Amino acid sequence: MAFVAGWPVKHSRSPLIHRHWLKTFGIEGDYRLEPVKPADFPAFVADLKSGASIYAGGNVTIPHKEAASALADRCDTVAEELGAANTLWREDGRLCATNTDVHGFAANLDERHPGWDKVSRAVVLGAGGASRAVIRAFRDRGISEINVVNRTLSRAAELADRFGPTIHAHSMAALPEVIQGAGLFVNTTSLGMDGQDVPEIDFSTMSIGALVTDIVYVPLQTPILKQAEAQGLATVDGLGMLLHQAVPGFERWFGIRPQVDETLRSLVIADM
Ligand code: ATR
């Protein structure tokens, strides 16, 4: 039995994903929505720690990711560095935490655009929690120059301090210059979500064969991806990140590593 705890949590697509895999493997178990208010989260975690809970583990989402990493008995290096966890499980009587967004981001691109990491310069738009996961994935793959562009320059500068000398912080005004010659562009902001307006971006100055991706997946073809595609660039949508980030959690709780396939993708698209 596993859960996704958040506040609000009712729009989460995680139950659809995990129940699909439970059914596929014929596992008798469930994956449930747990609406947990911030004030109630420490008690929820205490139950998990003590083993009194019905759950083997679960996911946490907004606004509990930071609290989850702080309250767990043990964070892996990813959750530790990001200061945020989205997956919890019990092991040897201890509550462990990781952040599977890093894996989800990289696995989506590995599947949809193999060789995506063979670039020397990348641009990340945004400097929030999602941006940290993307930066960690880039660093794991050895991308040597990571440019973080953000509306609030100080947040980008904080990331540069945190992640070290391969990270360069820029304000939005610098975007046209920063994007020139880059091989990879990722939007980690909510720009374009639910039909919001987005600024015009000239992707044509990126390097030949450059890739543009977005972690927003509603709508699937975000305004940023549409612009890039219209300018002849390769694009990958963000839905696969959601699907792939669910894989390590399912494996921890239920003991089988599931596949991300077209059936699952279609199931989630039909629900959007
Ligand atoms: P998440 O954890 O999903 O990354 P977050 O920590 O709230 O969420 O970060 C949101 C990111 O989107 C930030 O980089 C934010 O920019 P600021 O740091 O300046 O707030 C960015 N963002 C949100 N709305 C934006 C907008 N309308 N224009 C530009 N950037 C925006």
Image (cartoon, rainbow, N blue to C red):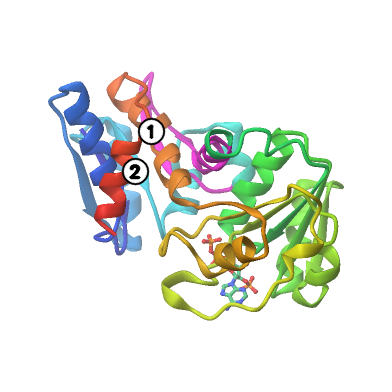
Q: Rate crowding at label 2 as few (under 14), some (14 to 19) or many (20 or more) other CA atoms within 10 Å.
A: some
Residue furthest to the left in view is 28
Is the C terminus in the top left, top right, bottom left or bottom right quadrant?
bottom left
Q: Is residue 28 above or below residue 52?
A: above
Dividing the picture into quadrants, the one containing residue 89 is top left
Q: Which mark sits nearer the N-terminus, 2 or 1? A: 1
Amino acid tagged 1: Val
Label for residue 260? 1
Point 49% across, 52% down: residue: 238
Work out whether 9 lies above or below 242.
below
Instruction: Name the residue at 76% across, 36% down.
Output: 118
Residue 188 showing in the rendered view? yes
Q: Are marks 2 and 1 in contact (CB under 8 Å)?
A: yes
Q: Position of residue 95 (x, y in %)?
A: 40, 32
Residue 4 appears anywhere in the view:
no
Vertical arrangement, residue 213 with respect to residue 92, above or below: below
Instruction: Residue under label 2, please give it.
Output: 265
> From what the image shows, is residue 169 above or below residue 240?
below
Q: CA distance from mark 2 to mark 1?
A: 8 Å
**Residue situated in front as seen by the camera: 266 or 239:** 266
Q: Pinpoint residue 22: horizontal percent, then vertical percent.
A: 20, 30
* Lateral position of residue 261 relative to residue 195, left or right: left
Question: In the rendered structure, which amino acid carries the disc numbered 2?
Answer: Arg
Residue 245 placement (x, y as % from top left):
45, 39
Please give the range of residues in magenta.
Answer: 83-109
